[in-house]
Amino acid sequence: MLFLILKTELMDHQEKAVEKLSGLKVGALYMDTGTGKTRTALELGLNRLSIGKVDCLLWLCPVSVKQTIEKEINKHTLNVNHEMLQPDEIKDWDSDIFIAGIESTSQSDRINFRLYELVQDKECFIIVDESSLIKNPQAKRTQNIWRLGEQANYKLILNGTPLSNGEEDLFAQWYFLDQRILGYTSYYSFAANHLELEPETGRVLKAFNKKLLSKKLAPYTYQIKKSECLDLPKRTYSTRYYNMTREQEIIYQSTMEDLLFSLDYSKFESYSLFQLFTALQKVVSGLTQHNKKIFDKPKSNPRIKLLLGIIEDLPEEKIIIWCKYKHEINGIVDVLSEKFGADQVTEFWGELSENKRNNELDSFESKARFLVANKECGAFGLNLQFCSYAIYYSNNFTWATRYQSEDRIYRAGQENNVHIIDIVCNNTIDERIQDSLMSKQSIVNNFRKSIDKLKDKDDLERWLNNAKKVSGKECVSSST
């Protein structure tokens, strides 16, 4: 029978998940990255396929993860026919599993139409992997996936945590599964019963009736954390500091004053704060707010100089370097290629083609020492536990992205201690970002919590400048 083609054994916590959800048509696996969501979902899906409950599995995941899902299917199964769907391809629906990019449902009318044909023609078990990507009810992506879900009786969502940002994330994911579970036919009715919104902007101020939400979701949810089921090596953190050049300091202060002058303090909208923080972070990374390079050569940038110094102090092992901006990736790739050889440096970011990204990952695993990657693209789904060093050259503003990116290497299969190193510029927005991430908050939300204590723009400027003076010393490492 078909279920016998699963060739790897379930771990205890995976068996518990299958036991809970196997009798349900819909469900959620909220399992920490690295705890085996893919293997668990395969068990649930292929068992239903083997007894004729469904005709195929439709696996929706981030485009950057499609090859990883294919590798996981090959790792855990024998003779399962699977296809990775591309936006420009037409496939015959004769496979057991179809893998499609979540982003493609909004970016390619062609593939969205073909997927809709599939779910109309066949009884599909739809799996939405990294389901937090469909949290916005107004997004075309979300609405298209809802339409696919309306045609399927069997559905599953996978994510590391139910709440990437807050309770507002839940509605779109659970509406996809079955609107009767939450009991609301629209986001507005959900918000009226569970969210306090700011009248002018619609921003979520706080959530309420949380116990009622948990009670509704509990029968359909299996949730587990890595610490509860895996015995992983230690994870250590350290931070290395540096100072801007004098030219950078002048540009940084001028940028802050310009944006503070134009900021409407009475509103302090999230967009304005995001714009301010982004402009300051760009200066720290080596760009003006108008995207002009501050340094003629990348290796003149003190941030890259510190990166090279860190690498020289590390063993001859593979290293992931996480960046936020494209110009950072380009500069680091150029400098590392010159110093270590082009064959030792790979890159992974959104504008690379899917084939190029897959080739770069294969090269990193087989021969290259460095992977220079963008967290927005590479934080989800990649299995990189053959590497145990990660350097955060720059950080995003949200803890969820940071958490996901760390778990690319800190997951089942990791045999070595994992070392996480942050690069931070003294007395700048970098330290504010670092403080926010360490408290597991977005920097904008962290600022808003202290907004009542700030009376004017001078207070905001002091808040931005009031950073710890560490004089370039490395902070003490800690282990978890």
Image: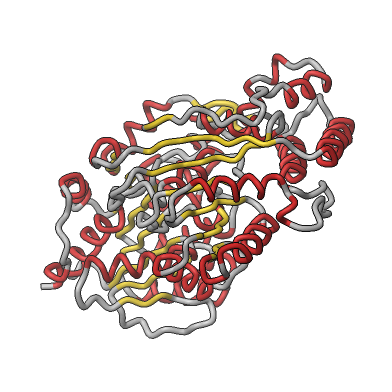
Tell me if residue 77 comes above or below residue 187 in the rendering.
Answer: below
Residue found 50% across the figure and 52% down from its top: 133
Count of numbered circles in the view: 0
Tell me if residue 185 comes above or below residue 371 in the rendering.
Answer: above
Q: Which of the two residues, 290 or 263, is positioned nearer the viewer here?
A: 290
Q: How is the image coloured?
A: secondary structure
Task: Locate residue 163: give its quadrant.
Answer: top left
Tell me if residue 258 comes above or below residue 358 in the rendering.
Answer: above
Q: Is residue 116 left or right of residue 234?
A: right
Residue found 60% across the figure and 62% down from its top: 339
Tell me if residue 204 comes above or below residue 318 in the rendering.
Answer: above
Q: Which of the two residues, 319 or 158, is positioned nearer the viewer here?
A: 319
Residue 445 image point, x, y percent = 61, 30
Q: Is residue 1 left or right of residue 176?
A: left
Quarter placement of the C terminus: top left
Task: Locate residue 91: give its quadrant.
Answer: bottom left
Residue 113 image point, x, y percent = 51, 75
Residue 27 at least partly seen: no
Residue found 55% across the figure and 40% down from its top: 422
Task: Locate residue 352: give its quadrant.
Answer: bottom right
Q: Which of the two residues, 215 or 76, is positioned nearer the viewer here?
A: 76
Quarter placement of the N terminus: bottom left
Residue 425 image point, x, y percent = 67, 36
Residue 376 image point, x, y percent = 56, 53
Residue found 71% across the figure and 28% down from its top: 427
Q: Is residue 124 left or right of residue 406?
A: left
Residue 407 at least partly seen: yes
Q: Which of the two residues, 189 or 369, is positioned nearer the viewer here?
A: 369
